[in-house]
Amino acid sequence: MSYCCCEKFSSALLIAGLRTTSEEQWGVTYTPERVCALKGSSVNFSCTYKHPEGLTVTKSLWFIESQWERDVEPVDVGEYNQYKGRVQYSQTLNHCRMTITDLRESDAHTYKFRFYTDDPDGIYSGRPGVTLSVTGLKVTVSDTDGGVKKLTCSSTCTLPNPTYIWYKNRQPVFNQNRNELNLRDRTVDAGSYSCAVKGYEELRSPAVCVFDKVLQLTVEGPVATASEGQTVTLTCSSTCTLPSRSTYIWYKNRQPVSQCESASCSVAVVSEAVNYSCAVKGSALHSPPVCEYRFSHALIIFSSPKNTRAVILPSGQRVEGDSVTLTCSSDANPPVLSYYWFNQSSDVVLGTGQNYSITSISSQHSGLYYCTAHNQLGQSSSGPSRLDVLYSPRPPSVSEIGFNGSVRLVCISDSNPASSYTWFRKIGGDITQFGEGANLTLAAGTDGVFYCMAENQLGSSNSSEWTFTSAGLWKQFAVWGTVGFVSALVLFLIIAVLCIWRKRGAERGADVQPVRDSPSDTYSALNPETRTSDNDTLTVVRPHPVMRRAPENEN
């Protein structure tokens, strides 16, 4: 505590003894007079003031001593742009207080309190004011005997009763509350160290590296949605203090990237994973060489599914009755969320999941199958994969076609692979092979019971028997001839009836029709010679009316 005398006092007050007051009745006391505070923290300046009785304080302010010109009213601290929003006043009877938040190094000044009374000459500023020092924390490393590393947390001014906190790799180091920290084990103690003061843990010192040099590689840009062709920025940084004007070296898949030498490097997004690393070499001239800082970072690109594939397992031939599993795979990041299976013959979803199993396959399962893969960014469909189910021949069917006095038998069977056909002839108890191929032609005189056999590598199957005799063949021919004759006769009769009907219709159209009484009747005006005596009817006018007249030379 200190008592402060008058810095600016009315001359009239001093010379004439205005209101019989003395200098001892005026004063401002600052508590404390010097303050050391951390950069980024808040500080409070407190004071008490006095004035002669009978006067009333009408105004007060704080000002910066170094910016006050004599005989000119000082400027209120809060009116400077750099203090806007950071200064608060609190004042009660004979007590004054100013708070400055978010301290900056430029705030280091001597601040004074000034008050005004209802006497125009009653203005007072107290000495010496409050001197503010703003400091940050700094960790220094020194070597001691035995290879011990001594870390010291220091400031440019003396902080009031500080309790120190140490951090290793951003994690607190317990039971260490002094401003010094000794490290002995290179293996255990290697890392990044910083310090802070209790109550201001967020205001830490810059980190320093001890026994090791560490770089971090970060990715800036739309990483979560980056797609091929976009650009992201890689930044090489360290939790430790690096030499100024360091030279950066970038590596792509362990190969130097010459076009980028700054701490940040822009790279194009590609569909595959790429390993990038950064390094810093060199330091100020004449200093010992520094280590090469290096940190690898895999740049993973996010994309919708690509290279979607559908595979049928097991591979090889698939025979009716086997079981198969269809597997879908796709390249996607984020990973595929869902898979859907389809048969190309329809758009109906057969199943979901990366695998789709079919037990006891049959010929109905043969076809082309494909899958679709979906994630948050899109979807992709695979190409079709063919499921080819092999099976033995189904019982063949036999059909007959007659032509040119013979009969052709046709044998058809469903199978995979395709069947070969063999014909057999059965007479009595004897069975002999009679031909090969799907078709068999039987001429007249070839009697017997016939059937065909369809065969592939998986099995064989026989058709039902078909009996053929020559008499039956001629009987068929007779029936076919009779049917043809009857058909032709019926067609002739239909045509004759139609002709007769048309002829009678034409004759009915030529009959005489009634004549109207109107003198303007069109038909009566056509030929007057055709009228009858009573003018009721018209006769039919023939194409050659001259033949109805008598010859001119006849008499």
Image (cartoon, rainbow, N blue to C red):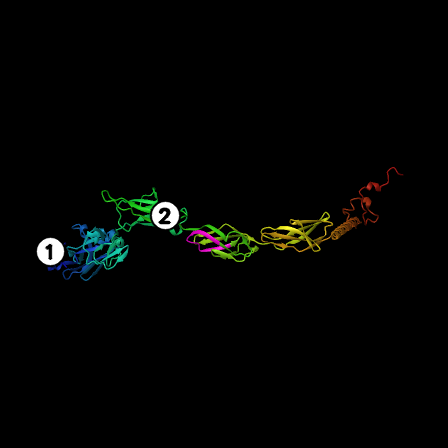
User: Residue 398: x, y in percent?
Assistant: 66, 53
For disc 2, the marked residue is 275
The residue at 12%/55% (across/down) is 12
| Left or right: 239, with 519 as reference point | left
User: Residue 56: x, y in percent?
Assistant: 17, 60
Q: Nearer the viewer, residue 528 or 31?
A: 31
Amino acid type, callout 2: Asn
For disc 1, the marked residue is 14
Label 2 crowding class (10 Å Cα cut-off): few <14, some 14-19, many 20+?
Answer: some
| Left or right: 96, with 17 as reference point | right
* Secondary structure of the residue carrying numbered label 1: helix
Q: Residue furthest right?
A: 555
Among the 4 quarters of the image, the one containing residue 57: bottom left
Amino acid type, callout 1: Leu
- Range drawn in magenta: 327-341
The residue at 32%/46% (across/down) is 278
Q: Is residue 338 magenta?
A: yes
User: Residue 198: x, y in percent?
Assistant: 23, 59
Q: Looking at the figure, which quarter contains the N terminus?
A: bottom left
